[in-house]
Amino acid sequence: MFVAPPPSAPRASVSDMAALLDQVAHASSRPRYAFMVLSLIAEIARPDGSAGPFVSFNGRSILLRDWLCDALTPMGTRDPKRQALTEKIRGELARSDKLPREPEAALAMIDEEVRERVRSSGKTNLSRAVSELVKEGLIRRHYQGFRVDHHNRGAQRHVVYTLTGRARCLMNRRESRSLRDSRQGQLALN
């Protein structure tokens, strides 16, 4: 009866979301994919908006780019190219006589090889999408790790993405969900 309503998202965040969608649609060649990338980064970002270089997943630490690629992998499961890749790998393993006789072990080996190849190509897609978002000012990309000032970008450094600009509204939506009080029947007193 005297319970305060749960805090709602600020009204400005609704228009921020619409503006963000419009900005992503105009900046990216694949706006749905780019928005999924932004949403996933916002989901795991720290309060300052940064995510990476490592993500804790299922009790282990995984690189941010690997986690993003793995999280986006199910989007192409029904794609004919993915099914053709599975059959191609099955044929390659059978011809090289590396395919185990047990069906479960064979399926596991094929799935692992598909996952590795999809992750490899997924990193290219992810890099392209993030580059478009960086140009648009929605993400800042930098690297952390050993030999940060090394001229070779791969010098054991790993990427960190930070949400900037309008992309920060995705953080507000996440925070407003976590602020909701799920307890029922509590009397709110000053």
Image: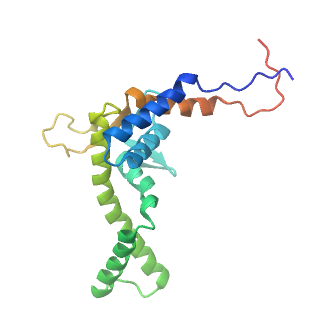
**Dividing the picture into quarters, in which one does residue 142 lie?**
top left
54 on left or right of 170: left
Q: From what the image shows, is residue 174 above or below residue 105? A: above
Rendered residue at 37%/34% (across/down): 23
Q: From what the image shows, is residue 158 above or below residue 190? A: below
Q: Position of residue 180 (x, y in %)?
A: 67, 30
**Dividing the picture into quarters, in which one does residue 153 lie?**
top left
Q: Position of residue 132 (x, y in %)?
A: 28, 40
Q: Position of residue 131 (x, y in %)?
A: 27, 41
Q: Position of residue 159 (x, y in %)?
A: 30, 41
**Dividing the picture into quarters, in which one does residue 137 lie?**
top left
Rendered residue at 48%/49% (across/down): 57
Q: Tell me how many marks there are.
A: 0
Q: Quadrant of the C terminus?
A: top right
Q: Quadrant of the N terminus?
A: top right
Q: Residue reaching furthest top?
A: 190
Q: Residue reaching furthest left?
A: 151
Q: Which residue is more in the foreground, 41 or 131?
A: 131
189 on left or right of 19: right
Rendered residue at 44%/65% (across/down): 77
Q: Residue reaching furthest right?
A: 1
**Is residue 126 visible in the rendered structure shown here?**
yes
Q: Which residue is more in the foreground, 121 or 105?
A: 121
Q: Which residue is more in the foreground, 131 or 13?
A: 13
Q: From what the image shows, is residue 35 above or below residue 105? A: above
Q: From what the image shows, is residue 70 above or below residue 4? A: below
**Is residue 142 visible in the rendered structure shown here?**
no
Q: Which residue is more in the foreground, 176 or 159?
A: 176
